[in-house]
Image (tube, grey):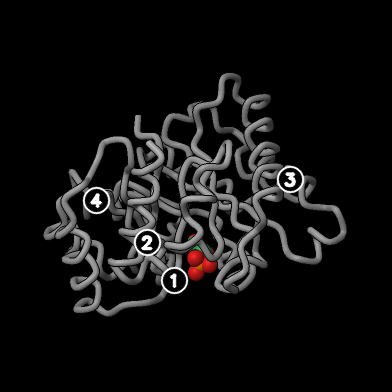
Amino acid sequence: MSKYLIAGNWKMNTNLDEAKIITDGLHSFINYDSEVEMLICPPYTHLGFLSEIVDLSRISLGAQNVHYEESGAFTGEISNDMLLSVGCEYVIIGHSERRTLFCETDVNINKKVVNSLKAGLRVILCIGETLEERESGLTNSVLKEQLNIGLAGVVDTINLKIAYEPIWAIGTGRTASTDQITETHGFIAEFLKNRFGANTIKILYGGSMNSDNAKEILSILNVNGGLIGGASLKSESFLAIYNSALELC
Ligand code: 13P
């Protein structure tokens, strides 16, 4: 098992030409290492094309969302089977942008988590608190609720990862402090240990991670990787973060 997972969430960015430029840039890098897994999560429309041109033994491919039903009258939605059929290995579920902008609830998110795991995808479940919740001392109770409901019915965790993304740190240039990350990742690790026994589930940090702060963040106890937005849109900055993880191995 790799030591770190460095994942890029491209969100609703890049057309196909731009996607190719990023992946070409990533491919040109030679120091791939089994200790650090690289994952890119482009928009749905690029997945089939990228799975043809990306060396999937060096770069894993993931989607940013999925629907929990297998098929049917769900206009505009994408199923687990569709993702698997285009070479997708991972799926991000419950990103805070899905929760706040598209009204996703913990119950919906749980259906996705359970069904994607059942389908054989690797799931990155995102959790995180608002600034108001943090300032009111509610961080741990918010995360506990998101984990309790989001992971209901999950037994086999081999394909499960958690991403802690404080909402106030996403796209703001403001990262959580080392103390905040240490404490919160420690809380999540303890939760997972109590819930599943021996805990080998990776916990990623997300929120304004970049080439300058990655090494410090990735060296914190219980931080097993990063979920990177803005800095994953340029191969240079994403590779610099990947390199930071390599240096820590
Ligand atoms: P930024 O790295 O742009 O803050 O985004 C983080 C994120 O939301 C990744 O899922």
The type of residue carrying mark 4 is Ile
Residue named by callout 3:
145
Using residue 4 as the reference point, say whether residue 113 is left or right of it: right
Label annotation for residue 230: 1
Any atom of ligand 1 within 8 Å of the CB at mark 1? yes
- Seen from the viewer's position, the closer of residues 24 and 93 is 24
The type of residue carrying mark 1 is Gly
Label annotation for residue 134: none
Residue 114 seen by the camera:
no
Any atom of ligand 1 within 8 Å of the CB at mark 4? no
Distance from label 2 to label 4 (Cα)? 22 Å
Residue 169 position, x and y percent, is 62, 65
Label annotation for residue 59: 4
Marks 3/4 in contact by CB < 8 Å: the verdict is no
Quarter assignment of residue 4: top left
The type of residue carrying mark 2 is Ile
Give the secondary structure at mark 1: helix
Using residue 56 as the reference point, say whether residue 217 is left or right of it: right
Distance from label 3 to label 4 (Cα)? 33 Å
Mark 3 neighbour density, 10 Å: few (under 14) some (14–19) many (20 or more): few
Using residue 81 as the reference point, say whether residue 122 is left or right of it: right
Residue named by callout 2:
78
